[in-house]
Amino acid sequence: MFCYRTAGLSVASDIQLPGATLELPGPGPDLVIRAGPVPDALEAPTAEAPTWQTDGRRVRLQIPDIGRFLVCGREIRYRADGNAGAVDVAAFVGGPLLALCVSLRNRAVIRASAVCAGGNAVLFCGPSGAGKSTLAAALVARGHPLLVDDVCAVTIAPAPLAHPDTTSLKLWLQAIDRLRLGPAKVAPVRPCLEKHYVAPEAWASEPAAIGVVYHLRESRPPHASGIEALNVVDATVAFARTAYHPAMVEPLRARDLYFQVGAAVAGAAPVFHLTRPMTFDALYETADQLERHWAQIGLQERAA
Amino acid sequence: MTATVWLASYPKSGNTWFRLLLANLGADTPADINEFAETDSIASARGAFDTHLLIESGLLTHEEADNLRPRLYEMLASGQRLDDGVADHLGVRFVKAHDAYVTTGTGESLLAGARGAAGAIVMVRDPRDIAPSLASHLRVDLDEAIVFMGDRETTFCGNRFSQPNQLRQRLLSWSGHVASWLEQTDIPTHLVRYEDLMADAADVLAGVLAFAGAEATPQEIRRAVEFSSFAELRRQERESGFRGAPRPHAPGHFFRRGETGAWRDELSGDQVARVEEQHGGMMGRLGYHLSSTAGVARPAMRERE
């Protein structure tokens, strides 16, 4: 078995999870990932869609040509389809299925990337395609260690913490080329995709206190470029909206959890809209702007 | 259950304008074009796919995502959905689609046939007027836009090196796109010509609502037409810009001219000849007379329900 620590969980897996932090085997992992039988359906689903079912404790997910998955808080069991390789399965297991597992453990998990600045976590929240990984990559290249690429598990006791999920960025070829990260390219996320694992220059392997949160927006009318503070209420609502799997919030009765965690984060760290052009040309300017902003809000000093 | 009706069009055929007309039905003041664009949705939106199917489309090839798209549309049409940004205040979900009516690799309708929608409004526009508008949208020259419109392999969001915010849309050629919708036999269609919309928006809108089973009073329709006038849209775009414009922001306007027949000023004789050579057959079916014939006739095509 391969042993990892990711998204706040100790994991024992019979497939390699590229990018997750390897660790020595320990007793009783939080999560076991293994091949095994997956039922055709759950017996008493409380919610379902064409690709998934849940009974509130487990989720059964079917991804055509990839495999079937049965996820609970302690196990991700998979049965790969004929043509799918371990790498294909791992791409989903290490991302959306891991997020499902964290959700089933009644923990908040949001769609965010994060880097560390002054020992604090800087979160970039937004839907898929919002530019989270690319922005994180630009900041990592400036020496800010990578904390999270995609699956951001957040706990609030005793204080809001973001848990590391990876030691790799997942970037599309265009971003790799534009950021000149070709030499750091490790392997394709799936053999059929031009999306690759990219080794960052530095990464953080321990949870970090959340120092600041940015919700990413593209500068298109009516939103002009800039950094704009959210009040606690708006910040809490925005956090709840970044739940990794919004469709699971109601079936898993997690609405209160996301508001509770969102309120705790908004109470402990400033929350902003970061509105910027989504072009590579503007990326370095955005990174400059962020570093100036961290100095203004005292982020670097807060860790001292 | 709220019926779903596709608003199907080749790009730059008036789809955004028509949806603004619908958004203004029952409104007391003109709909804010940016609020509209921010909450507007399209069949190929990536977020709805990822959210409802629990599958990260960014980890799928275009072909794999296509194979799953029918499942999404069945689900949404059946009423099982989170807020997907589609307005249904008229009792009908009018959903924009730029996809041609194509099949997936497994041979089923990409848009799930009758399980995905009760019908389709097929919006068409004279391809000679689309060409300049498309060139402006894609920021290419007119010749490139004409090649784009004649190529059966063209797509939106179809590259494999980055992740666009929408799923890939196969457009086919302009003629192929229109034919794919009008010739499919899964769902009834109602043809709307941009030129007729310009000439009498109230009449066309009433026809669409009757087809879709939605109701509005003549006063509501009249007011929606006023609130969606090009003068009003250009005023709003001038004052605050338009979120729906392509990125990065090109000089000029999304709501460009809104005219019919402007191609006579914008296309060279050679360019007109190329468009007509490629698409003359479909243009004739839709009543767009070739340049040797003056005027634009009414379409000979009949509504099929």
Image (spheres, rainbow, N blue to C red):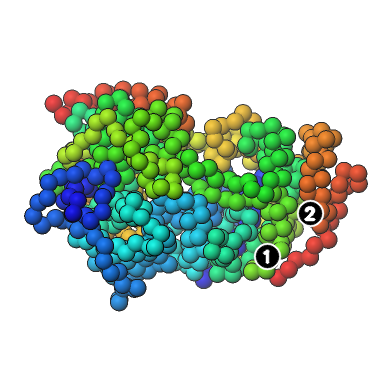
The quadrant of the rendering that contains the C terminus of chain B is bottom right
Looking at the picture, tell me which residue is in the foreground, A71 or A246: A71
Residue receiving disc 1: B184
Residue count near mark 1 (Cα–Cα under 10 Å), binned few <14, some 14–19, many ≥20? some
Residue name at image x 59 percent, y 61 percent: B103
Q: Are marks 2 and 1 on the same chain?
A: yes
**Height in image: B11 above or below B72?**
above
Residue name at image x 64 percent, y 48 percent: B153
- How far apart are the two marked residues, 2 and 1, measured between alpha carbons? 15 Å
Residue name at image x 71 percent, y 61 percent: B182
- Furthest-right residue in view? B293
Which amino acid, mark 1? Answer: Gln
Residue count near mark 2 (Cα–Cα under 10 Å), binned few <14, some 14–19, many ≥20? some
Question: Mark 1 falls on what kind of element?
Answer: loop
Residue name at image x 69 percent, y 45 percent: B151
Which amino acid, mark 2? Answer: Met
* Residue B247 x, y percent position in the rendering: 54, 35
Q: Quadrant of residue A112?
A: top left
Circle on res. B282: 2
* Letter of the chain that mark 1 sits on in the rendering: B
Q: Is residue A295 visible?
A: yes
Question: Mark 2 falls on what kind of element?
Answer: helix
Label total for image: 2
**Height in image: A222 above or below B104?**
above
Looking at the picture, tell me which residue is in the foreground, A43 or B277: B277
* Residue A169 x, y percent position in the rendering: 32, 38
* Residue B1 x, y percent position in the rendering: 51, 71
Q: Is residue B13 visible?
A: no
* Letter of the chain that mark 2 sits on in the rendering: B
Q: Are marks 2 and 1 in contact (CB under 8 Å)?
A: no
Q: Quadrant of residue A235?
A: top left
* Residue B226 x, y percent position in the rendering: 68, 48
